[in-house]
Amino acid sequence: MSQAEPALRRRMPIGAEPSGGGTSFRVWAPASAEVSVVLADGREAALTAEEGGYFAGFLPGIGTGDRYRLRLDGNGQLLPDPASRRQPEGPHGPSEVVDPHSYRWRHPQWRGVGIRGQVIYEMHVGTFTPEGSWAAAQAKLPFLRDIGITLIEMMPVNEFAGRFGWGYDGVGLFAPTRLYGTPDELRGFIDAAHGHGIGVILDVVYNHLGPDGNYLPRFSRDYFTDRHDNEWGEAINFDGPNSGPVREFFASNAAFWIDEYCFDGLRLDATQSMQDDSRDHIIAEIARTARAAAGGRRIVIVGENEPQETRLVRQPERGGFGLDALWNDDLHHSAMVAVTGRRPAYYQDHRGSPQEFVSAAKHGYLFQGQGYAHQGKRRGTPGLDLPPWTMVSFTQNHDQIANSARGLRLHQRTDPARLRALTGLMLLLPATPMLFQGQEFAASAPFFYFADHGPELAVAVREGRRDFLGQFPAMATAEMQARLTDPASPELFQRCKLDWSEAERHGHACALHRDLLRLRREDPVFAAQGRYGLDGAVLGPEAFLLRFFGEDGDDRLVLVNLGPDLERTSLPEPLLAPPAGRAWQLLWSSESSDYDGGGTPPVENGTGWSILGHATLVLKAQPADQD
């Protein structure tokens, strides 16, 4: 049945690709002497050995929808394709041939996105709607557009074991999970997002594979290495013997999502665990490969990096890896301490002080090489020269909500006024803001860690989660340990699904986010993201100001007070003085009645200042004779 492959260009170096009246198969299995394709009807065809441990062949008459497995060296166990484009029965079942050309794109003119000016929205498809599907999520795109979202960051969707999960235990890296719909329904979601002016990037995990359904070691042990430690399992072999095809596998995966699904970029999970001592780091290679796959489209690549290594966002000619932005945990930690007053575990090095917010607004990371008590070592690398949009700022994300043990969102951990004030600050900072799904309407649904595994693995995951949360002293008590949730509980997963009726009932929360994002987008000074300069000063124990400089004195003053009312007959701070010939006029207040606030009295009358407690106020420099 197998024959020489006709003259055609493969899109990817591995996997099954239909074309020319059949399907081209290619797989890397360097330890095997024979590899064959076994079809669902029992037909079997041997692939031809190539140099470097690859096996390839063209099977005529095989096309879209046909299911197959691979057999190594005549072994009785049939395996899924490591580069399977679809696993309709889950990671342990047969692979399915998928034609990437079958979908007809409705917005082929879409030219992609750049990082500057974006508002990111983190989405977990399985809990974003009650249905938990791409089709259902697509219906919510007009709402996100109207709020002001410009870029969706989709949590991992590659195939994983079980009925539900976060997606970070993926094992079928080229196969969109069967749980959320078909490959073309994923394409349909991305296509529809583009029609609404929204880009979509995908969270990808290149630091480990999940514990259930990972068949890569059956094809080659060289996919993994013991040369590096990894907190989630075996480290990926990016720099050891036979690492070339491994690097190609992961770099090709990055290109695959950009090419075949028109994703607008990637978010690289836990890049500190993508360990590579090569001269050409795998992160830099992935970034180059992904951008090449985009052709003329612009894409955004965001990194998560716990050690805060700023070289990731520097250009290759400066020794960097060429990413566009990095998550900024520092700002989140300061915000949480400021509004909750708690400093356990990894919050201990933050005080939530006004100076921390001023420094974060001006410089991004707070730790850029200083000592870090929580880890007993230095943390971070210099980044004072980085433009502000390279920092992704947030007050909520999937990890941090789940780490509250009860899955509480920020509005459930502080009072409404402080929440509004902090929201105003976060959405007007020159950094790139990110919201977590439902944040924009104060969703009541918690977000727990959940993962559906078999009994033995489920016990290990549950105990591992308890150990992790035990770093928080309050959660290490016998009382709280007994109350911690079971990640394998289907009921727990269901509780995390958003109740979309709240988007209508919580109109004040929607208005808050919509108005702030409109101000960020349409006001020339905020839209400039610090282009004309930014400075700040501390006004009190919980109060500070940020001054955004505009052209020709068109400045903005952001006053943030997370404490009680601040009444001063005078404030010896030059940043409070209006530009020559201008006076400050209130432009926006977190205490507007539109947001369920209590109203805003006059802020400054020339003889004194009255800065509301638990509020953020925005003043605009107007000509002095203008009302």
Image (cartoon, helix red, strand yellow):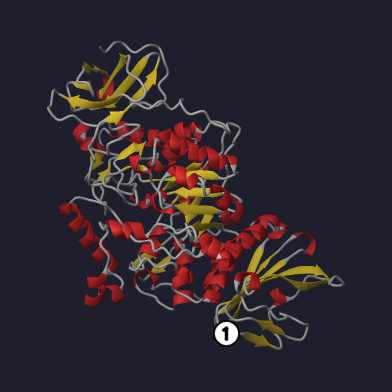
The answer to whether residue 320 shows anywhere in this view is no
Indicate the position of residue 422 as horizontal and vertical percent values: 55, 70
Question: Splitting the image into 4 quarters, where does residue 63 fall?
Answer: top left
Q: Is residue 369 above or below residue 598?
A: above
Element assignment for label 1? loop
Quadrant including the N terminus: top left
Type of amino acid at the residue the image marks with label 1: Pro
Q: Is residue 549 above or below residue 275?
A: below
Left or right: where does residue 143 sit relative to residue 521? left
Indicate the position of residue 373 as horizontal and vertical percent values: 36, 71
Residue at the outermost bottom position: 569
Q: Is residue 182 above or below residue 542?
A: above
Left or right: where does residue 512 sit relative to residue 213? right
Question: Splitting the image into 4 quarters, where does residue 15 fall?
Answer: top left
Indicate the position of residue 395 as horizontal and vertical percent values: 48, 64
Q: Residue at x 57, y 58 (%)?
A: 431
Front residue of 155/28: it is: 155
Left or right: where does residue 591 sit relative to residue 267? right
Front residue of 5/246: it is: 5
Give the residue at mark 1. 564
Front residue of 371/96: it is: 96
The answer to whether residue 65 shows anywhere in this view is yes
Indicate the position of residue 569 as horizontal and vertical percent values: 71, 89
Q: Is residue 220 above or below residue 380?
A: above
